[in-house]
Image (tube, grey):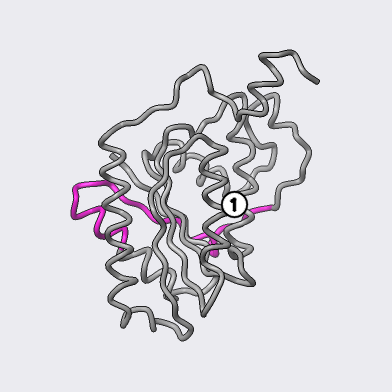
Amino acid sequence: MKIVGILGSPRKGGNTEVLMDVALEEARKEGVVASKISVRDKRITPCQGCRKCIKTGRCVLSDDMEEIYGEMLESDGILWATPVYFWSMSSHTKIVMDRTFALTFPKLQLASKVGGLILVAGGRGCVNTANVFHMYFSYNHMFFVEFASGYARERGEVRKNAFALNVARETTRQMISLIRARPRYPEEFDAPLHRFVRSKYKLS
């Protein structure tokens, strides 16, 4: 069993990374292989909207996303973690999310994986951000657990927040329980619903 953490914080050792590390350590205690990808250390080009991946299921851009694709495809669970900026995810996080468009062809390559989410905000915006991820998980036919959140401003401040630390741990444990249950989407629905309907009923 493997969980990969995708860390979208630009700040090394920041509050989002603190919660991510706590969550992944909990996974290791449960005997799960857990790895972390810090997006701030990667060279990732924004999606070009060329749509060439529609035919191949592969992105034409050659950069550090290739490593992230591999980790996501090999993992049973994908744990995203991002600070909340202006009521949404960080730009580091969004650039990775956008590039996973290629993984929705020729079928949903992330289907039936388990998604998790850690959010850290200064004061507001966690629910707004979580809603975007929940739509993302649903579109990809992933199963997902409740999200973990914390509120902190100064670097490392979240270490004093017992609730945030423990909800990060329990989110990971929920992911592991769901992975072990092995739920699966029917192969018939191996594309997003709008594409499935257009194909099945020959709609333009």
Q: Is residue 97 above or below residue 70?
A: below
Split into 4 quadrants, where in the image is the C terminus? top right
- The outermost residue toward the bottom is 154
> Residue 126 at x, y = what percent?
51, 66
Label 1 belongs to which residue?
96
Which residue is pictured at 63% across the width and 22% down the height? 196
Asked whether residue 29 is drawn in magenta, I would say: yes
Residue 66 left/right relative to 117 = right
| Amino acid under disc 1 | Val
In the image shown, does 153 or 67 lie closer to the viewer? 153
The x, y position of residue 153, in whole percent, is: 48, 83
Q: Residue 161 in the image: x percent, y percent?
A: 32, 79
Image coordinates for residue 105, horizontal then vertical, percent: 62, 28
Secondary structure, mark 1, is helix
Residue at the image point whose x is 42% and y is 33% from the top: 112
The relative height of residue 112 versus residue 27 in the rendered view (above or below) is: above
Which residue is depicted at the point 64% across and 63% down? Answer: 91
Q: Quadrant of residue 99?
A: top right
Residue farthest right in this picture: 204
Q: Is residue 85 above or below residue 79?
A: below
Q: Which residues are magenta?
A: 23-45
Left or right of 94? Residue 18 is left
Quadrant of the snapshot with the N terminus: top left
